[in-house]
Amino acid sequence: MFLGLAAGTVLSTGLFPRGALASGMVDYTPGLIEEHLAAGKTVFVDYAASWCSTCARQERVISALRAANPAYDEAMVFVRVDWDAYGGHEVSTSRRIPRRSTLLVLKGDQELGRIVAGTAEGQIKALMNTGLQAGS
């Protein structure tokens, strides 16, 4: 009960921008990724489901890496696509996303890297470094 109340309080007080998650990811809405790509930004996309343990592990690794190196947040926009809501949507089908727990780095009209169901810190760090280099 307390955690739900605290989270609601944080969100309602405006500490996070609208659509931003406590993890620093922005919730996907249709057109959001394309908007950032058109603006020349590098986009890290996390296709996840709230009930997915692999997704939770990936999120912990991503959060720890971002906390250790703030340059990731300067170089990329982090977007979380809710698999339950958008798994069959164009944002998933156009990129041939096979399942939740898929991570992508996009720049312009190119996919720079992808991980499917990987949770190893080294693997995720390498993907994030690809985005860091592209975003610099």
Image (spheres, rainbow, N blue to C red):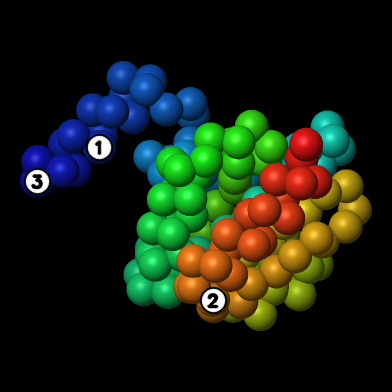
Q: Amino acid at mark 1?
A: Ala
Q: In screen coordinates, is 36 left or right of 127? A: right
Residue 94 image offset from top left, x and y in percent: 80, 67
**Residue at the spot 39% in from the left edge and 67% down from the top edge:** 57
Q: Amino acid at mark 2?
A: Gly
Q: Residue furthest left?
A: 1
> Image quadrant of residue 8?
top left
SS class of the residue under badge 2?
loop
Viewer-nearest residue: 60 or 81: 60
Q: Amino acid at mark 3?
A: Met
SS class of the residue under badge 3?
loop
**Residue at the spot 31% in from the left edge and 24% down from the top edge:** 12
CA separation, marks 2 and 3? 32 Å
Q: In screen coordinates, is 10 left or right of 66? A: left
**Residue at the spot 83% in from the left edge and 32% down from the top edge:** 39
Dot 2 or dot 3: first in sequence order is 3
Q: How many marks?
A: 3
Residue 27 image offset from top left, x and y in percent: 53, 45
> Image quadrant of residue 13?
top left
Front label number (2 vs 1): 2
**Residue 7 circle label:** 1
> Image quadrant of residue 68?
top left
- Residue 125 visible within the image: yes
CA separation, marks 3 and 1? 10 Å
Dot 2 or dot 1: first in sequence order is 1
Q: Which residue is mark 3?
A: 1
**Residue at the spot 66% in from the left edge and 61% down from the top edge:** 127
**Residue 118 circle label:** 2
Viewer-nearest residue: 124 or 58: 124
Viewer-nearest residue: 25 or 63: 63
Q: In screen coordinates, is 25 left or right of 112? A: left
